[in-house]
Image (tube, rainbow, N blue to C red):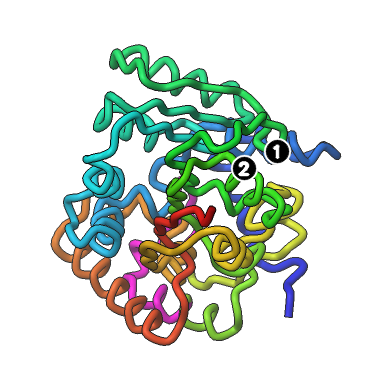
Amino acid sequence: MKRLLTLEDIRDVYLKMVQRGHSFIFSKFTTSEKKRTKSSFNEAIISGSNWWSIPLVRERWNYLITGDKNVTYERYVTEKFSNEQNVKMLSLGAGVCSHELEFARLNPGWEITCVDFSEKLLKSAEENANTEGLTNLKFLVEDVYKYNYPDNYYNVVLFHSSLHHFKGLNEYIRKVHRSMALKGKLIINEYVGPNRLQYSKQQIKAINQNLQLIDNEYRKMYKTNLYKKRYYGSGILRMIVSDPSECIESEKILPVINNYFRTIEEKGYGGNLLMPVLKDISHHFINPDDHQKDLIKKIFRHEDEFLKNNRSDFVFGIYEAIK
């Protein structure tokens, strides 16, 4: 059953106001879906609020994707393409381009094109590239739906945490597929779980069991005096108001990819429990002491048990275009 409005939504509005300011809340009072979506990404990243800010979480991702906690997926991909010349990469919904910048550092011979609708984020990325002297990147402020995709051109197309924001996936992926060269590779690092984060009752129960494994003192929420006692699940109404694109067709991502691509490798790295549990309390674990490390490892083990019988909500995959 879909949830329209929950206590999680009310709490989240308050948290966003405290963490990101009144101007962020007011940016949602517009009928333009594009403007509401854009405001979600133009604001500064809230360090300490989200699970990806925790070093141990990043090490977990590395291990589950590459087999080595110290090897990122960018380096892993680079090693796989080490014998290929004149690689042309397209990154769609590139945002601040942190991953594209890393690919540029590792592969100075690659031609990397970053496309995003946020001028602010791409300008920041371009400034970083210029500061580092990286000359193999292009930054295009464009709507990904309207971008003029050349036929049979790109060797690699990358979606990092962007594809779950796209709609009309079948037609869109078909367009991307046409732009790829023979044996072109699609790389995703994506949320592929339930649309609009409409978790099942079973998953919400497991999320709350996971949350209870953390000492209460480390459940104090970022920049507030509130404690995270329970997770209630996201309501569709708030998600649409906040960002109409969020997880709009996430459930379709893998089935649609399978229509146009052959799977080379596909690895789940969880997030089913950890993402909702650690949201707004991640700052406690940025520089963990031994006890905090033990807590993090405990909730990792609990998620691993859950994943034995449930599909991962986050997936890294490499796919080859079927031509």
Residue placed at 66% from the left, 62% from the top?
A: 196
Dividing the picture into quadrants, the one containing residue 61 is bottom left
Q: Measured along the vertical axis of the image, is residue 282 above or below residue 123?
A: below
- Residue at 54% over, 38% down: 152
Which quarter of the figure is the N terminus placed in? bottom right
The earlier-in-sequence mark between 1 and 2 is 2
Q: Which residue is mark 1?
A: 145
Q: CA distance from mark 1 to mark 2?
A: 31 Å
- Mark 2 belongs to which amino acid? Met
Q: Amino acid at mark 1?
A: Tyr
Measured as percent of width and height from the top left, residue 210 is found at 39, 76
Badge 2 density bin: few <14, some 14–19, many ≥20, Cα 10 Å: some
The residue that label 2 is drawn on is 17
Q: Position of residue 185 (x, y in %)?
A: 43, 48
Q: Are marks 1 and 2 in contact (CB under 8 Å)?
A: no
Report whether 229 appears left or right of 80: right
Task: Describe residue 291's horizontal placement relative to residue 302 as left or right.
Answer: left
Q: Which residues are magenta?
A: 208-228
